[in-house]
Amino acid sequence: MPTPDMLQLSLGPVLFYWTRQRYADFYRDAADWPVEIVTLGETVCSRRRDMKLGDWLGIGRELAEGGKQVVLSSQTLIESEADLRDLRKLCDNGEFLVEANDQSALQCLSAAGLPFVAGAALNLYNPASIGVMARAGMQRWHAPVEMSRVDLSRLLDDCRAEGLEAPCEVFAYGHLPLAWSSRCFTARRHQKPKDRCQFVCQKHPEGLALRSQESREVFTLNGIQTLSGACQDLRHEVADMAAMGIAVARLSPRSEGMADIVTAFDAARRGELAPPGPLSLVEADICDGYWHGRPGMDNTRLPAG
């Protein structure tokens, strides 16, 4: 078992659109993985209706019975009154902490006096904004995905100097969430209108690669969300992250190979990952540029030249 002062591992919400059976199988397996926190819910598109709030609550209860801390994550882009109604139900679930991914969720939770996790999309870059969130009930905050190690270390030092002790979570593995749009790029790719998309996202359980003219996978299209083409992999940085005072490393779910990814990060936080180790855990390009203050798509572990 992890020691109390060890970096915790969390599973982020599934960003892609899977079938109900795939979700069920994934979280049944995840119950046995060495992660302390599991974040559930649909964060990308309200048209992905296979899973209702009751379904997420059912999965959450099973995971909680197994000792996991369960968090329900809100949608990042709210576009309609129906989205707001669903958001209010989520915030008023009465069982689990909610991760706020936009100002609507933040307002709903803080007005009700409910504790919450601040998602990366809230863009917390300085102690002043983190202090505002802490006073509103924030229990943990997720660093912006493009923030470098140097900038985050400085921010954490400034927060400690001001007595702000809310734990920080860092996106440590997966396709980086970069942007959201009112347009659905996946539907457009299949020549379908957004409101009659026929749920083509389910044809791409790890997103749709967008390549440059040089055939490099620059982005991953996921409905209205744009992700990085490569997967960020900070396995080799976890000791440094723990020394900085980062509390949680988030691993973003993939449809294949996730058990191996979790095992590798668990070994890394215990100091058991023999360097340099394999650069890629699954069939995906790797990046870590943002963490090192470079273009996000860079992989600093590749040999020079």
Image (cartoon, grey):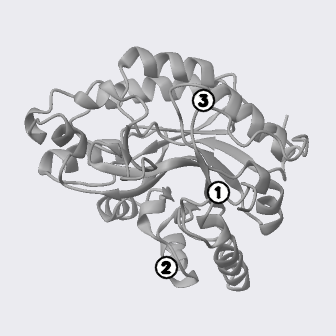
Q: Would residue 191 appear left or right of 178 to someone viewing this image?
A: left
In the depicted structure, whether residue 24 falls above or below residue 193: above
Residue 257: x %, y % from top left: 61, 26
- Whichever of callouts 2 and 1 sits on the residue coming sooner in the sequence is 2
The nearer-to-camera label among 2 and 1 is 1
Tell me the element at label 1: loop
- Residue situated in front as seen by the camera: 2 or 244: 244
Front disc: 1 or 3: 1
Question: On the rendered structure, is 98 left or right of 47?
Answer: right
Q: Are marks 1 and 3 in contact (CB under 8 Å)?
A: no
Question: Disc 1 and disc 3: Cα gap in Å?
Answer: 36 Å
Give residue 83's position: percent from left, percent from top: 20, 47
Name the quadrant of the C terminus: bottom right
Residue appearing at x 81%, y 62% in the figure: 240
Q: Which residue sits at x=64%, y=65%?
A: 291
Amino acid type at mark 3 = Ala
Amino acid type at image mark 2: Ser
Specify which label sits upstream in the sequence, 3 or 2: 3
Q: Is residue 280 left or right of residue 11?
A: right
The residue under label 1 is 299
> How many neighbours does mark 2 have within 10 angstroms: few (below 14), some (14-19), or many (20 or more)?
few
Residue 179 lies, with reference to residue 206, above or below; the image says below
Q: Quadrant of residue 121?
A: bottom left
- Residue 111 visible at all: yes
Q: Which numbered disc covers residue 64?
A: 3
Residue 129 image label = 2
Q: Quadrant of the N terminus?
A: top right
The amino acid type found where label 1 is placed reads: Asn
Tag 2 secondary structure: helix
Q: From this view, report whether residue 276 is shown above or below residue 136.
A: above
